[in-house]
Image (cartoon, coloured by chain):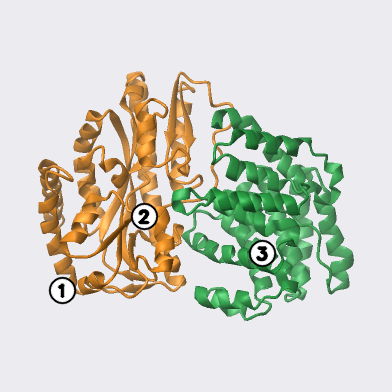
Chain colours: A green, B orange
Amino acid sequence: MLKFLAYFFLLLVTSFSAGCTTVVVSYVIEPTVGNLQRQTDLDLVCEGAPAFLLAVDSFIVSEPKNSAMLMTGVQAYSAYAAALAECGRPERGAQLAEKSKQYGLALLSLGNGMAPALAGSLEDFDKALQRFSSSEAEKLFWGGYGWASYVGSHTDSPAALADLVRVERIMRRVLELDETCSHGGAHLFLGVYYGSRPQMLGGKPEESRAHFERALELSGRRFLSAQVAYAEYYARTQFDRELHDRLLQEVLDFSLESAPELALGNQVAKHRARRLLAEADTYF
Amino acid sequence: MPRLFCLFLFVSMLCLPAGEAGAAGRHLFKIASLAPAGSVWAQRFDDFVREVEEKTGGEVRFKVYPGGVMGNEQAVYRKMRVGQLQGGGFTMTGIGEVVPDFRVMGIPFLFSSYEEVDAVKEGLWPHFHKAFEEQGLTLLALSEVGFVYAMSSKPVSSLEGLRASKNWFPEGDAVSAAYLETIQVHGVPLGIPDVLTSLQTGLVETVFNSFYGSVVLQWFTKARYVADFPFGYGYGAFLVDSRAFAKLPPEYQKLMEEAARKHFDVLLLDTRKSNAEALDALRQNGVELLPVDEANRAELQAHREETIGRLLGSAFSRQIYEETARLLEAYRQQAR
């Protein structure tokens, strides 16, 4: 299944919701994450991000329950893990994804009785999810996202696979609360999730397509990971070459300047789109 | 390898050997499997592909279609017949319709340890190889799902419990169907994709899978009680079209056979490790293992013989069964 998450990883940070509490977050870290997202030089990000991540860590150590800071932590680590995979160091990316999970779970544990439910029964987990309100959709999304990053890079671990059930429930709850959150990221997750599993193992191509279409709509087609994931997890498995090539060409034709705040994620997406197109004759 | 009752492994990265593959290479093998891209199966298969491609200097090439994109096992087999595909990973259930004798290791309660499985499998290899060859298929390796357990949405750990429960059996699995009939258990035939929904709606209450399969297919979210007594053994085969294989120079044939056995041996260990780790994951998610007492074990095993009587000559041949029984007994004697 899920090479999927490799993709999902690309869902980089984006608009950061308001309500950030500390000066440090608002004036230092947030803009830095923003700048990281504007980078288009992948190698530079791969080499240069560690110092920034260490700074994020130290802020979280001093304020372990600061949700804005934890969200930044999830975003920074998952983005970096994704970049490392594209820079040819997926193993290192997998190690760093442990941190995104750690911060993601910490984020989820901030309230609603979720802390004990994380490893409890699915019934208790569902009950805790129901207690999240619309204003917490973003927090819930990034909590699940950090967890998903980890699962995606640890797909050989049965324990991680078992966690997917919970991540899926988180994303479905996010859709109930606010489907527009983070460019429709929950739709993108579910598109990949249902598209990447073989049908006989629970994959649902039609649902996958619907989620991808909605993700494209909500992102205004500016968040290129959505097109790339759609091509890879839906068009390929359905052997729809026309759709596959059309989506990827759209990615290559997109001007990075027209969405500067998404430049890093979009650059990674272009990278991948080029590779998928080059392989297309072999695949189809 | 995909396999039996259920299955297995999944997940993660495929990355088809990139663009340069394709047309190049004098001998191209297109291989399909149900195993998802990124699963342990797909990873080991990539290792196999890499070794063969390297050692033949690119003369032999592969194109891999994981995740069931080429359809179910019957579809893959048909595509092999018409030359659209040259190979595939199959489960014992899927390919049992073509080579019935291959089903023999799937008799319920036949094996009690992996050591027994390995000894018997080794002894049966030449028989399986020959049987597949007669159908135009070359057996390159065996794979496994592992031991399969009865898993239920309500606590079931006895024959009585099974009889009172609504039991699933895999569509097309003659061996399991005959056993359930013998123990007078009502069975509901369903394809794998329908099992989870049926567990959720209560159409079935007891299903059969390996620990890893239960995690991957998410059956554990409903089937929370596992009877701690292996019900059967699930396995599969990596087969290629004999005509395509025969076109290879003998040294390449040998190389491919050796590489397949080497990497599928590693896969076997990976699969067993995954099953062991999956059991831990199941426990962490609240799944409970229920002990099965001696009396029930004895009774369940006793019905096996009766089942075999019904299956001989139809589901598989008497010869293959007798050879299996002989190998198993020989192993048990020397292990004593």
Residue B165 position (above or below residue B129): below
Given the image, on which type of amino acid does mark 3 rest? Leu
Find the distance from the CA under tag 3 to the CA under tag 2: 38 Å
Q: Name the subunit of mark 1.
A: B
* Callout 3 and callout 1 share a chain: no
Q: Secondary structure at mark 3?
A: helix
Residue drawn 72% across the image and 34% down it: A249
Given the image, on which type of amino acid does mark 1 rest? Ala
Q: A74 or B250: which is nearer to us?
A: A74
Q: Which residue is mark 3?
A: A175
Q: Is residue A201 left or right of residue A214?
A: left
Q: B171 or A87: which is nearer to us?
A: B171
Residue drawn 83% across the image and 63% down it: A29
If the image is split into quadrants, where does the N terminus of chain B sit? top left
Residue A174 position (above or below residue B335): below
Residue drawn 81% across the image and 66% down it: A17
